[in-house]
Amino acid sequence: MTAKVKRGDRRIYQKRMALLQAALDPLAKQGASTAEIHARRGLMLNVYNTVPGEYERTKNLLRSVYASGQGNGATLGILVGDNANYASLIEYGTGPHEMNPAQLQQHLEVLPKGGLLRFGRTGQAYLLPGPYIGPAIIYARTLTRERLHTLMQSLFL
């Protein structure tokens, strides 16, 4: 004896998929906004709210942070970065204190949700890394996954 398992009505799934696809772009834009705010928090912690010292604080780095998000039915992408030509020097540090991307990634993997990295960078200890883009990416990714998971549960369960 063979039994047929009746699956859900095709139209219901099509309607739910259409709702999911329509929600991806706003979800991506929300993630981008989260990333940009978090990057600015990291900059304030690692650069602007530290002991002043060797360089002039123009806040150019803070103004150069950008983030964008886009969802297109099947994918969701968030881009966050900084246009300042010295942004990578802040993110990774310089000289004997410079971190490579793999080292930074190891720190990011154990970062608690919403956490910021601080390695003691100040206006006087300006060679130390002051990551702000990496933590913003991790935080945006975590929140976006949670939001997407909640959306999927509301649509399909």
Image (cartoon, rainbow, N blue to C red):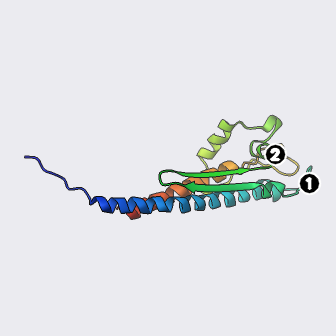
Count neighbours of disc 2 (C-alpha within 10 A) and say few if under 14, some if 14 to 19, many if 20 or more.
few
Residue 143 position by quadrant: bottom right
Left or right of 3 in this view: 19:
right
| Of pointers 2 and 1, the one earlier in the residue sequence | 1
Camera-side residue: 25 or 3? 25
Q: Which residue is at 67% across, 41% downward?
A: 104
The residue wearing badge 1 is: 56
Instruction: Please state the horizontal and vertical placement of residue 54, each as a whole percent of the image.
Output: 92, 49
Q: Which residue is at 85% across, 46% downward?
A: 125
Left or right of 89 in this view: 18:
left
Q: Given contact means CB atoms under 8 Å apart, are the residues at marks 2 and 1 in contact?
A: no
Up the image or down, 26 lies above or below 72; here it is: below
Left or right of 81 in this view: 113:
left
- Report the residue that reaches farthest toward the left: 1
**Which numbered disc covers residue 143?**
none
Which residue type does callout 1 highlight?
Glu
Q: Which residue is at 34% across, 59% downward?
A: 13
**Which numbered disc covers residue 85?**
2
Left or right of 151 in this view: 45:
right
